[in-house]
Image (spheres, rainbow, N blue to C red):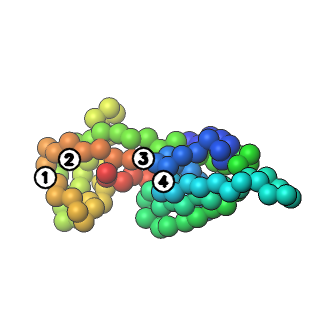
Amino acid sequence: MAKEQKQVRELQEGSYVMMEESPCEINAYSTAKPGKHGSAKARIEGEGVFDDKKRSLSQPVDAKIWVPIVERKGGQVVSVDGNDAQVMDLDTYETFTMRIPDDEDLSPDDEIEYLEYEGQRKIV
């Protein structure tokens, strides 16, 4: 499992957090001051890294939460077939097929960056 535990107060916008068993990038992070009967609360809003679903979470700031270790890697496009691209990892020379995002225009020999977490990959 490529994840670690952190306290909610250590999180910040742009970092990753596990929400509903899915890695999400934090878009908004806000805290509410402690009241008469409780501790300070944090509200986290994020978007799924691989499924683009919006999720939100409310936790005490001293609670522990899982943070995925999402790796940013480099690759080279070997071939393009419709919406799929055959990509070779530049470190391990492993080849695999990835879906091309709608806003990307790739051709063979292009170098790309992609995110990887537990076998899931996404071109950025």
Badges 2 and 4: C-beta atoms under 8 Å apart? no
Local crowd at mark 4 within 10 Å, few (<14), some, or many (≥20)?
A: many
Q: Nearer the viewer, mark 4 or mark 1?
A: 4
The amino acid on which the numbered mark 4 sits, given as a three-letter code, is Glu
Badge 4 element: strand
Residue 4 horizontal side relative to residue 48, left or right = right
Report which residue position mark 4 lands on.
25
Sequence-wise first label, 3 or 1 = 1
What residue sits 24% from the left and 52% below the top?
86
The N terminus sits in image quarter: top right
Looking at the image, is 101 positioned above or below residue 120? Answer: below
Q: Is disc 2 in contact with disc 1, using a CB cutoff of under 8 Å?
A: yes
* Label 2 to label 1: alpha-carbon separation: 7 Å
Residue type, label 2: Val
In depth, the one of 30 and 112 nearer the eye is: 30
Query: According to the image, label 1 marks what residue?
Result: 107
Residue 37 x/y as whole percent: 86, 58
Q: Amino acid at mark 3?
A: Glu
Label 2 – label 4 distance at C-alpha: 26 Å
According to the picture, the residue beneath numbered tag 3 turns out to be 116
User: In which image quadrant can residue 94 be found?
Assistant: top left
Q: The disc labelled 1 sits on which kind of residue?
A: Ser
- Residue 36 visible in the shown view: yes
Crowding around mark 3 (Cα neighbors within 10 Å: few <14, some 14 to 19, many 20+) is: some
Q: Image point 65% across, 41% down: which residue?
A: 6
Considering every residue shown, the one lying at the far top of the view is: 91
The residue lying at 52 percent from left, 42 percent from top is: 69
Q: From the image, tell me which residue sits under label 2.
A: 77
Mark 3 vs mark 2: which is more N-terminal?
2
Name which residue lies at 58% across and 45% down: 11
